[in-house]
Image (cartoon, helix red, strand yellow):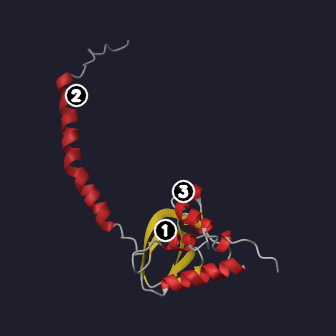
Amino acid sequence: MIPKLGRVRRASPAGGLLFLASFGLLAVWVGPQLTRDISAAAPSPPPLAGPARPIDGDTLALGPTRIRLWGIDAPEADTPLGRQATRLMSELLSQGPVRCLDTGGRSHDRIIARCQGAAGEDLAEQVVAAGLAVDWPKFSGGHYAPAESAARKARLGLHAPARAD
């Protein structure tokens, strides 16, 4: 013989509302505690500031950290214009400490950053304005196009007429 089951009891709407309200209060009370604990435990990133040394026309080093300048491309260091770009970067960095803002990008284990020289000038813009690097619109959105245009108009660096040797 099959035992008869009692009526299935349905939850009342008031019980569901009470459960939701209790859960909401718990989330409001516990949520900020979790966020505070997580943010307190997260180490802050190392500052990207201080004396730097040149690697090439679009890369510098702050201690052991290599930084690729955002939005530009300079000739390779082993080419004549690459050596000029590296010398310019050396001159810019010799004026004092730099400050860089990590853009979040990475390239060949280098941090992609926007960097300012000691006087607050944009280092990438300085190299482009000298004609020793070009704007890389794929990454910069054309940010350095005006500096590149001025260098082209003045026929500087990469934009100089080819010499017949």
Circle count = 3
Above or below 116: residue 139: above
Q: Given this view, does label 3 or label 1 mark the residue nearer the observer?
A: 3
- Give coordinates of residue 153: x percent, y percent: 61, 65
Mark 1 Cα-neighbour bin, 10 Å: few <14, some 14–19, many ≥20 = many
In the image, 30 versus 87, the foreground residue is: 87
- Give coordinates of residue 87: x percent, y percent: 59, 84
Secondary-structure class at tag 3: loop
Seen as rendered, the residue at the extreme right is 165
x 26%, y 14%: residue: 7
* Residue position marked by numbered label 1 in the rendering: 113
- Give coordinates of residue 83: x percent, y percent: 66, 82
Mark toward the start of the polypeptide (2 vs 3) = 2
* Residue position marked by numbered label 2 in the rendering: 16
Above or below 164: residue 149: above
Mark 2 Cα-neighbour bin, 10 Å: few <14, some 14–19, many ≥20 = few
Q: Given this view, does label 2 or label 1 mark the residue nearer the observer?
A: 1
Amino acid, disc 2: Gly
Asked whether, in this view, residue 47 is left or right of residue 160, the answer is: left
x 53%, y 61%: residue: 146
Q: Are marks 3 and 1 in contact (CB under 8 Å)?
A: no
Asked whether, in this view, residue 23 is left or right of residue 52, the answer is: left
Q: Given this view, does label 2 or label 3 mark the residue nearer the observer?
A: 3
* Residue position marked by numbered label 3 in the rendering: 142
Q: Quadrant of residue 45?
A: bottom left
Amino acid, disc 3: Gly
In the image, 47 versus 56, the foreground residue is: 56
x 77%, y 76%: residue: 163
Asked whether, in this view, residue 76 is left or right of residue 4, the answer is: right
Above or below 35: residue 148: below
Mark 3 Cα-neighbour bin, 10 Å: few <14, some 14–19, many ≥20 = some
Mark toward the start of the polypeptide (3 vs 1) = 1
